[in-house]
Image (tube, grey):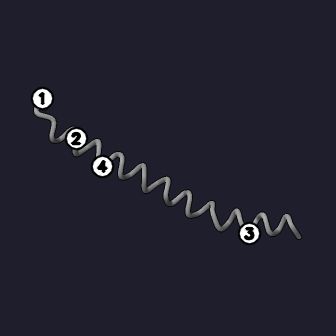
Amino acid sequence: MQFMTLLDLADDWIFPTLILFFFIVCVRDAYQMTRISQDPHD
């Protein structure tokens, strides 16, 4: 029973963590692209 509870908790935090991870990666890539595009040495 406790193992099932742990699985339920895992389902509760694994997906939000993955979504947050991909969101941070996308934002970081976009931030780097804007910095590169604004680079005067381009």
Q: Label 4 crowding class (10 Å Cα cut-off): few <14, some 14-19, many 20+?
A: few
Q: Secondary structure at mark 2?
A: helix
Q: Which residue is mark 2?
A: 35
Q: Amino acid at mark 2?
A: Arg
Coordinates of residue 8 in the picture (x, y in percent): 74, 69
Coordinates of residue 40 in the picture (x, y in percent): 10, 33
Q: Is residue 37 left or right of residue 27?
A: left
Q: Which mark is residue 9?
A: none
Quarter of the picture holding the N terminus? bottom right
Q: Which residue is mark 1?
A: 41
Q: Secondary structure at mark 3?
A: helix
Q: Amino acid at mark 1?
A: His
In this rendering, is residue 29 above or below 2?
A: above
Residue farthest to the left, as pictured: 40
Q: How many marks?
A: 4
Cα–Cα gap, marks 4 and 3: 34 Å
Q: Which residue is mark 4?
A: 30
Coordinates of residue 6 in the picture (x, y in percent): 78, 64
Residue drawn at x 50%, y 53% is 21
Residue drawn at x 12%, y 29% is 41
Q: Which mark is residue 8?
A: 3
Give the mark, 3 or 2, whose residue is nearer the N terminus. Answer: 3
Cα–Cα gap, marks 4 and 2: 9 Å
Q: Label 3 crowding class (10 Å Cα cut-off): few <14, some 14-19, many 20+?
A: few
